[in-house]
Image: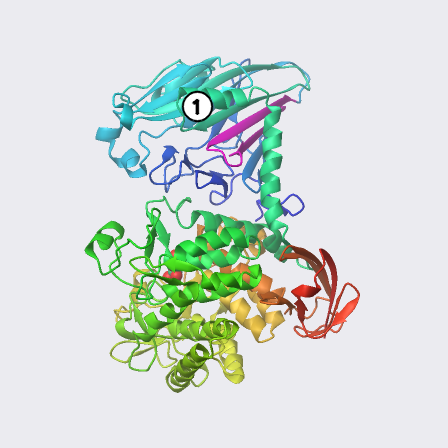
Amino acid sequence: MQYGHFDEKNKEYLITKPNTPAPWANYLGSPEYGAIISGNAGGYSFVKSGANGRHLRYHFNSNDEPGRYIYVKDLENGDYWSGSWQPVGKDLDQYQSVCHHGTGYTNIVSDYDNIHTESLYYVPLNKTYEVWRMKVRNDGTTARKLALFGFAELTNNNNYEQDTVNLQYTLFISRTYYKNNKILQVINENIPEEQTWRFFGAAGAEVAGYDGDRDTFLGEYRSYGNPASVANGECSNSLNYNTNACGALQINVELQPGEEKEVAFLLGQYDEQGASEILSHYKDLSVVEEELEELKAFWHSKLNRFQVQTPSDNLNNMINTWNAYQCFITFIWSRAASFQYSGLRNGLGYRDTVQDIQGIIHLDHEMALERLRLMISAQVSNGGGLPLVKFDHNPGHEGTPDDPEYVRETGHPHYRADDALWLFPTVIKYLNESGNWDFTNEVVPYSDKGEDTVYGHLRQALQFSLDRMGAHGMPVGLHADWNDCLRLGAKGESLFVAFQLYMGFKIFMEIAQNKNKPEDVAWAQGLLDELDGNIQKYAWEKDQFVRGFTEDNYTIGSWENEEGKIWMNPQSWAVLSGAARPEQARVSMDKVYENLRTDYGTMLFYPPFRKYGLPVALMALFNASTKENGGIFSQPQGWLILAETMIGNGDRAFEYFLNCSPASMNDKAEVRKLEPYVHGQFVESKDSPYQGRAHVHWLTGTASTVMVSLVEGIMGVQPQKDGLRLNPCVPSDWTEFSMVREFRGKKLNIRVENNNGVQKGVSRIVINGEEIQGDLIPVTQLAAENDVLVVMG
Ligand code: GLC
């Protein structure tokens, strides 16, 4: 079933049936002021931290409640509804709604009983408050008297946990006041240094009534769907004292036939003076349209740095808007605020963050650089990554997983084997996109002590693995490799990390070569050869690579095993790293296709673990076909697509894309449940009774891996030190497609012809009328704007 569709031109997703199978969300704001909102206006807001700066309450694991509600009451006939379908939930035969989720804004349009409303929600660029602007229009033939009620349920404490469970304390520290069109809430009023102020105000109209006490607004034994004040048609002018607070403001409007009025509600953590200044900014509500345009321009100018026009709308929507936007959202929010993540984790996961950076490099390498620097400064001087990089990370002064204090603060007593190795693909991507190879000379502190150039940091990342090799001459798995549920320890070995190290050596050699350091190249080459020999000797099993070895030499991911016989990541990573010989790549990738592919994506491995007999395989704690236990983990889908493009299988790469693309499930949303415009963390696979159901929306490393596979793999746009390589790998039935790409400040309008129907292989490139040799357009040949023709086949 379909609940909505993409609007590619406006970079929006339109929810046309509001009763979506899960809350379909969007993000507003920035880390300074964050907000998440569903298509039914459910969601929460916070300043700086979802866990410690929360002022708009949301019940996790609930029925998407509460949120940013604007109720409409007909003062003559007594009927009432809401600007979003929920919470009042009118009969959908009479209530129409279209929710426009866009880049940094959400606009919910509704029509009911001849009243048309538009509820626009956004956080103005670089501001730390939010705007809910409602336009209301009388589409009928008689005059109407309406009351609008804006309702914000305020938390009792900025700390999410305190607000939710420590009621014997937090219920008694807040109170509200009403002053000049706004509710003001103060927490810890009697201790000036501890005070926190919030406000909920109205602009564009006079407030006719208010409630600062939630229970009075809702009424006894009533709920968000039928609040007493709305049902009565008037607020009680209540204020809370030792009860829950809220901001509820009533505005009465009279509308002649055809007449439209507008009003705005403003919410934020400001005291009276700050709130009054904000309200006065909205005296003239035309400022709202300006701010909205500014917001769109901000996001669209980023996204427009790479746009494609291919025969697949699905791919176009993903590359041009939604996957790209999800990359930014995941980059910005990490795993800190969604309807599943409450923000309680007080920092950035190393591996997740370093990978997230990859997703935005082609669109904003400057934004990427700042975060990359931070992550390099979170590498410990022994070369490993800090498992958790605290939001107040202090380079040079942090503890390590070996220090009790760090462990106490973060709860992370162990290193992961993979963390710092993620720097290699991310750093090289940054260097090639920006051309700023001097970055390798930049001196960055280690997290604990000392400092080194970026180049030195990279070498140290290799050293961390070299210092921790196992019996087969491969890196040990420590507390986890990419897979959080593989606990191979100090002796068991991980093929995932072996392939990462393989890739690390190759990228290090490329950088060393460019820096003219032949001794370093030779050093890495020797070690690479050794690793290569060990992989070939121990890890290749007839037609597949194994996943690892436990400390007592049990092979994980062997066809001989009863459970977990074949794993996806070792096959794709053997290709990505370059370790697989061409024949190995062919047969092992075929085996993945035959044994692990489903119509909803490709399983991590099969069969899932049911008999808990392998203590290192912790994933048995999940139901079969779920998450790391043989589920369709979404992040590795990108690696699979990319690997297929590297071996020239455009048809299969595209099939894998279609299998995992959220947009493919737009018409089967009742199966997938999650938003059809964003990836989730995983999809249930074939041993689940709910095959195809997706979970954990928005904040997932999938955004970046799939994005990279589409941009560099399928579209084949591969920045290099001295230019831009164009080497697409596409379905053989694509005869023509085009792209617009900004690269080093130059614009390229690229048209690709594929009249011979090949999947890969460029025969000619013509730039500004001049044919070039090979598939690399030298940066020196780029004008401000360029016409590029690529002929495949
Ligand atoms: C989750 C974690 C990520 C990990 C993956 C596989 O997505 O955020 O760090 O690599 O699970 O276990």
Judging depth in this view, the residue of 787 and 659 nearest the camera is 787
Across and down, in percent, residue 760 comes to 65, 73
The secondary structure that most of the magenta stretch takes on is strand
Q: Which residue is mark 1?
A: 274
Segment colored magenta: 111-138
Circle 1 residues within 10 Å: few <14, some 14–19, many ≥20:
some
**Residue 181: x and y, percent?**
47, 16
**What's under tag 1, amino acid-wise?**
Gly
From the top left corner, tell me how far across and down residue 440 is, in percent. Answer: 47, 64
- Asked if residue 701 shows in the view, the reply is no
State which quadrant residue 551 falls in. Answer: bottom left
> Magenta includes 113?
yes
Q: Nearer the viewer, residue 463 or 605?
A: 463
Residue 137 in the image: state x and y as whole percent. Answer: 63, 22
What residue do we see at 71% from left, 60% from top?
738
Tell me what residue is drawn at x 43 percent, y 55 percent.
373
